[in-house]
Amino acid sequence: MPELLAQILLPTGWEDITSDLRESGGAVIKRGRPDEAAQVDPGELTATLNNRGGRYSVRNPESDLFGSIGRYTPMGVWVRGPDRFMRPTVAGGRATVAATTAMDVTADLDVRLELALYSIPALDAAYQHAVTELAGRYVTSGDQRSWRLLLDNRGVPSLSWSTDGTLAGFREVSATAPLPYRPEERFALRATLDVNNGAGGHVVAFYHAASLDDTWEPLGQAVTGAGTTSIKAGTTAPLEVGSLASLAFVTGHGRYYGAELRNGIGGPVVAEFDATVLPAGTTAWTDSVGRSWTLAGGSTITDWYPRALDEVVTWPDQWDTSGNDAWVNVTAAGPLRRRSTGQKPLESTLRRRIPSADPAPLAYWPMEDGSAATSAASGLPGGQPLTLTNVRFAADSSLPSSAPLPTLADGGATTDLVGAVPGAAAGGWHAEMVYRLDTMPATERTMLRLYLAGASGGVTAVRVRISTAGIRVQALDIDDNVVAFALFTDPAAIASFTGGWNRLALFSYQSGGSCFVRAAWRDVGAGTYNYAGTVWSGSTVGRVVQVRGVWGTDFQGAAIGHLAVWDVGGTGTTSPGVTIYDGADDGYSGEETVARMRRLAAELRWKVTAPGIAGDSEPLGPQRTITAPDLLREAADADGGLLYELRGSLGALHYIRRRGRYNPRPAVILDYSAGEVWPPFTPRDDDAGVRNSIVVRRPGGSASAPAERTTGRLSTAEPPDGMGLIDEDIELNLAGDEQLDGRAYWRLHQRAWDDARWPQVTINLANPRAASLRQEILDGLDVGAVIQILNPPEGRPPGPYLLEVASYTETLDAVRWTITANCLPAGPWAVATTRPDILTADTPPHRVDTALSTLATGIDTDDMSLSVATNTAAGGLTWTTTPTHYPLDIEIGGERMTISGITGSSSPQTFTVAQRSVNGIVKSHPAGAQVRLAPPTPVIGL
């Protein structure tokens, strides 16, 4: 039976309420999504609490919890597991060993950890992705830096060392790939430093495994550096696992099972930490090689594993008619429930971004007002509106980064813009706006004017004037006499002033006895400015007190918006001091999925983690004005990844990019014949979710040609040759039309995968036959994880089965601990890659077959040689005859065979069979039976 711990989070800390759980009800946890095409629903935790004294009646003033519980009170359920671990506190918990000469690894280094992190990567106090501290001997004071192992803000491990203990002697190398593990999943990480590779260099390599005792797999490629190196000798720095006391990064919060420090690569252990053998509550111990360990910073040795950390959404009081019994059926939900409740669409990216500048603007007018507006409201609290005459508000919606903006008057009327700028200080300023002007006026006209106070040389205003002849920047006195000017006549730069959405900035700076003002303009989304500027003698450029625009018939139909002013000057002749428009000006178009997730996490102040390196997720179209949860889901859908709620971090979400889901390792392996799968266990071969023709569109863009399955049982052919046409037309917010076909074919690959789904896979952990699975379940089973099932019953499809968990229900009470998973085929996620940052010398070969190979002649049950024909005329390639590519498995008519070699350079080829009936199926096969790899591995665009 499971040993449960239930708690609620009060203002004073976590309160144990386990004794009030009704044994008959226990706790029921639901997590996941209904199918492959959907993102996850909010998780749900339900439990029944005894309430005879009214303790959990929210509005009972006699309860000791009165005023402390209510809507969204955090509630958690934990289960005691077989293995103990160290749980460091977020604020700096660690296990530590005092410095000893035995731990002075000064030549080759080999450091290993076994852990499960609750957040990958960590988040800092500002909800930015942060560097995670894992282990090291690293003290900054007294130059006692030796080495440290970190996880960077992309989820990529890094190893650092110092040759002499100083920062100057400090070196750092990162892995070439992020960790292929999700939060709460148990894994081992290893980093080695070969200080002298024998060829005048040094080598850093990273590895990963399921545990410290498992086989190590390379994590990306080894990194070779120029020159030999060394590690600081005689350091007084302690060995620390968890938080590193001298650093200001974020502690790797989670479960630490073990660690090893070795002298030399594969050398003897000089310090060892194995929490699994320590009694819960241990604070000090001696390891197997005589090192004395202690816990610090509030860390603990424990065996409590979180199963749900949710927020109570309802506390319904219930009682029987006698009044002798009362209870509360509590329902708690995951963070997606609260984040999706009462959410209005986010404002445009420019509207959100510009006020967040540091320092904040003195004045900002978005001009995103409705069509009936008569002035433009300020975008700052308490700000004064902008006077605008003869404009059509909300008339132009073509700028993706903005709500509709006003256009200047048609029919010969003059548009007048006046805005006061309060609180400006002398010493430099910056004004910027976005605009769309189709053609340059033939005669020179003023584009924008700033009125100044306190400027040197009698200057009271600056203005930008434009025409087909050039861009002119002028400094004016009180009578509009020109004090200084410059004319910019480069034809290419002049041409770039018009023709689409642009940005125009006017900024100033001072240098010696000169005052400078420059105009800068660039296309929205472009990377470089064009400049024009002038200079006058004086010691101060003054301060901006008013902005003004007067536009006549040459500007009719032009659009303007997002005008802001700062008292921040330029940083040089070509460097504006304000860059807050960058990125936001085109709605972050082209931003990769994980980058958008990270940026939104910081902007929203939400706990959302999204590991991945540049180029590892799908580029997105402009951020749209929809709700924040919809923005996150839209990004996940476009990439094809999975956004889900974390179980061990309160209120947190995690995103696994599509490429991070490829070739998954089984989190749990179940043996059906050993009774580890509980009935009912019935597959469903139905049409749920099947689509055999896919069209993908993007907002405002093109549509892909249909991606269609034309052969096989799930093809668009009419029955009995196929299913007939079952199509889907979806919209994904992708950056460019060139992405459409790839996303359409990937979706077809998933939705027309010919395999059964398994709506009920039940694991009864209270059954002694499944008790040994408890640690595997606690360490790896979650939404999106893969279950492997061995030895299915006779007469059923041969195994093993690889199933992805779409959702699950977990029931915990005094007598039950069951997990019932709704599973989908995991086969679509097995793919081949040619990416050099993933491939290593130890990567097994990816094998890709063809659907155009068949048996040239039929075979009986005892035949061990096959004649296989390939339709090369239709584009099929003959099978490889390279001896090192064997053995490999093939499948014919449901029977799996192991092939030891193939001969023949043209079709038909001869296959030599080493074993028939690999999957327990053996039968005769006729000529023309299809020959495929087992399992087939698709090649897709990575």
Image (spheres, rainbow, N blue to C red):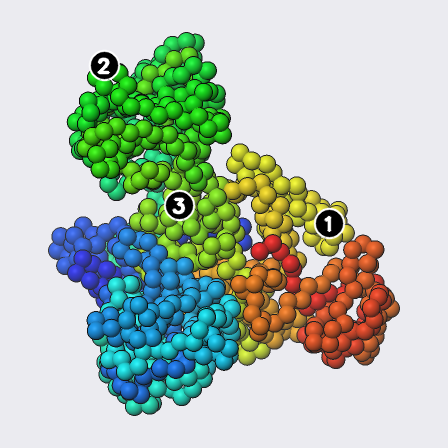
Residue that badge 1 annotates:
710
Instruction: Tell me which amino acid carries mark 3.
Output: Pro
Instruction: Tell me which amino acid carries mark 2.
Output: Asp
Say which quarter of the image contains residue 360: top left
Residue that badge 2 annotates:
479
Judged from the image, the secondary structure of the residue bearing numbered disc 2 is loop
Say which quarter of the image contains residue 918: bottom right
**Residue found at x 31% / y 40%:** 572
Tag 2–tag 1 contact (CB < 8 Å): no
Q: Is residue 116 in sight in this rendering? A: no
**Residue found at x 37% / y 47%:** 600
- Judged from this view, the residue extending furthest toward the left is 62
**Residue found at x 35% / y 50%:** 601
Judged from the image, the secondary structure of the residue bearing numbered disc 3 is helix
Q: Is residue 818 left or right of residue 732?
A: left
**Camera-side residue of 583 and 352:** 583
Q: Is residue 198 in sight in this rendering? A: yes
**Residue found at x 34% / y 44%:** 341
Relative image position of residue 527 (x, y in whole percent): 44, 40
Q: Is residue 826 left or right of residue 484?
A: right
Q: Characterize the local packing of mark 1: few (<14), some (14-19) or many (20 or more) Cα atoms within 10 angstroms.
A: some
Tag 1–tag 3 contact (CB < 8 Å): no
Quarter of the image that includes the C terminus: bottom right
The numbered mark, 2 or 1, whose residue comes first in the sequence reads 2
CA gap, disc 1 and disc 3: 37 Å
Q: Characterize the local packing of mark 3: few (<14), some (14-19) or many (20 or more) Cα atoms within 10 angstroms.
A: some
Instruction: Tell me which amino acid carries mark 1.
Output: Thr
- Judged from this view, the residue extending furthest toward the top is 412
Mark 2 or mark 3: which is in front?
2
Residue that badge 3 annotates:
629
